[in-house]
């Protein structure tokens, strides 16, 4: 019940080496304060494991709790379609308290992308299906809140401070070696 | 952990307040699949909250024609404030007086704590429990088990 049901694929936003020994998937919500707290921890974990870790982020907007979560997710997807996914991802998590339509279009401008392009994409719900697919896949995999992490496809049930998360990843790396992959 | 009623058991009927002046009976929902989600208390931390998650997944439950009812021992006014704060779009039933009576009937009451277990029941159109699951009290069980159970119901 707690296994990643949608395999990591080219459709995903990935950071790191595709042949890395360990994959960390986060289901997150850009407006979720807990995800905001997890953001620098994930950065630290990525730095710590370097090439041995592939990081994937998928959308899990809790729109009823966080009114900007869906728009933020679609804004990130818009940036992704224009080659600036991670820049937008980082900018969103670093500015959670500033969310508004004006702010999203400012961010897009700062990344050298078209603000009117974003407006059109949001209006036409160009990226809504992608965000929904992430969400549904997450639900099916047992995502039970945000953030939820999967390490090599298994849900990480413990806390997500640096120590716990990196220990769990170490175990993931250990299992990899044992399997002789 | 409690021994909750297993699949194949007739779901005990109940009638509980869902608002200060309105009661909901399980039998009223006969003909539709029903998801009963017992949870320990309103106001657990926001982002990992089980009811908030189900609220988001509600459209997927509705695809199966299913109705979701959250049940805890909190009173109606507490439920009302909680539902308003979290924008919940499904009823919360108050298993308040006699306290935990419905949870007890489902084998989902924690005597030592005076709250319900985190227990899930999917009840079929005929009022029979099709699937049940009791999660460790601190673990939000997510919605995947419910969706799988709904999918496995006879069409």
Image (tube, helix red, strand yellow):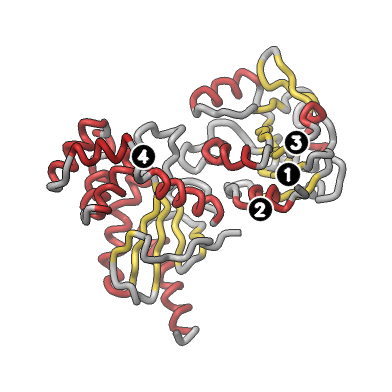
- Measured as percent of width and height from the top left, residue B3 is found at 79, 49
Of helix, strand and loop, which one carries label 1? strand
- Residue under label 2: B148
Of helix, strand and loop, which one carries label 2? helix
- Residue under label 4: A125
Determine contact: label 4, label 3, CB under 8 Å: no
Task: Choose between B128 and B3: the one closer to the eye.
Answer: B128
Marks 2, 4: nearer the viewer: 4
Mark 4 falls within which chain?
Answer: A
Of helix, strand and loop, which one carries label 3? loop
Marks 4, 3: nearer the viewer: 4
- Residue under label 1: B122
Say whether disc 2 or disc 3 marks the residue closer to the N-terminus. 3
- Measured as percent of width and height from the top left, residue B4 is found at 78, 47
Residue at left 75%, top 39%? B109
Q: Are marks 4 and 3 on the same chain?
A: no
Q: Residues within 10 Å of mark 3 (few under 14, many from 20)?
A: some
- Residue under label 3: B32
């Amino acid at each position: 019940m707690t296994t990643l049901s949608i395999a990591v694929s080219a459709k995903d936003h990935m950071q790191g080496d595709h042949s890395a020994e360990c994959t960390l998937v986060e289901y997150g919500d850009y407006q979720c304060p807990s995800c905001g707290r997890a953001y620098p921890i994930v950065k630290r974990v990525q730095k710590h494991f370097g090439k041995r870790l592939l990081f994937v982020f998928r959308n899990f907007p809790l729109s009823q709790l966080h009114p900007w979560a869906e728009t933020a997710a679609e804004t990130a997807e818009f940036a992704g379609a224009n080659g600036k996914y991670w820049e937008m991802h980082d900018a969103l998590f670093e500015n959670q308290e500033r969310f508004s339509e004006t702010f999203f279009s400012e961010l897009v401008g700062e990344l050298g992308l078209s603000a009117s392009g974003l407006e059109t994409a949001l209006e036409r719900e160009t990226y809504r299906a992608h965000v929904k697919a992430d969400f549904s896949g997450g639900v099916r995999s047992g995502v039970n809140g945000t953030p939820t992490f999967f390490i090599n496809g298994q849900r990480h049930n413990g806390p997500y401070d640096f120590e716990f998360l990196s220990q769990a990843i170490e175990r993931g790396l250990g299992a990899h070696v044992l399997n002789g992959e | 952990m409690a021994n909750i009623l297993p699949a194949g058991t007739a779901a005990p009927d109940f009638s509980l307040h869902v608002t200060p002046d309105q009661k909901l009976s399980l039998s009223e929902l006969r003909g539709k699949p029903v998801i009963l989600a017992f949870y320990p208390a309103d106001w657990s931390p926001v982002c990992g909250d089980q009811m908030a998650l189900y609220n988001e997944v509600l459209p997927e439950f509705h695809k199966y024609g299913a109705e979701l009812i959250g049940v805890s021992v909190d009173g109606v006014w507490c439920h009302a404030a909680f539902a308003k704060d979290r924008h919940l779009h499904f009823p919360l039933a108050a298993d308040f007086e006699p306290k935990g009576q419905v949870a007890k009937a489902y084998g989902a009451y924690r005597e030592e704590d005076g709250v319900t277990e985190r227990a899930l029941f999917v009840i079929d159109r005929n009022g029979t429990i099709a699937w049940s699951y009791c999660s460790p009290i601190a673990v939000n069980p997510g919605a995947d088990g419910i969706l799988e159970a709904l999918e496995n119901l006879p069409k």
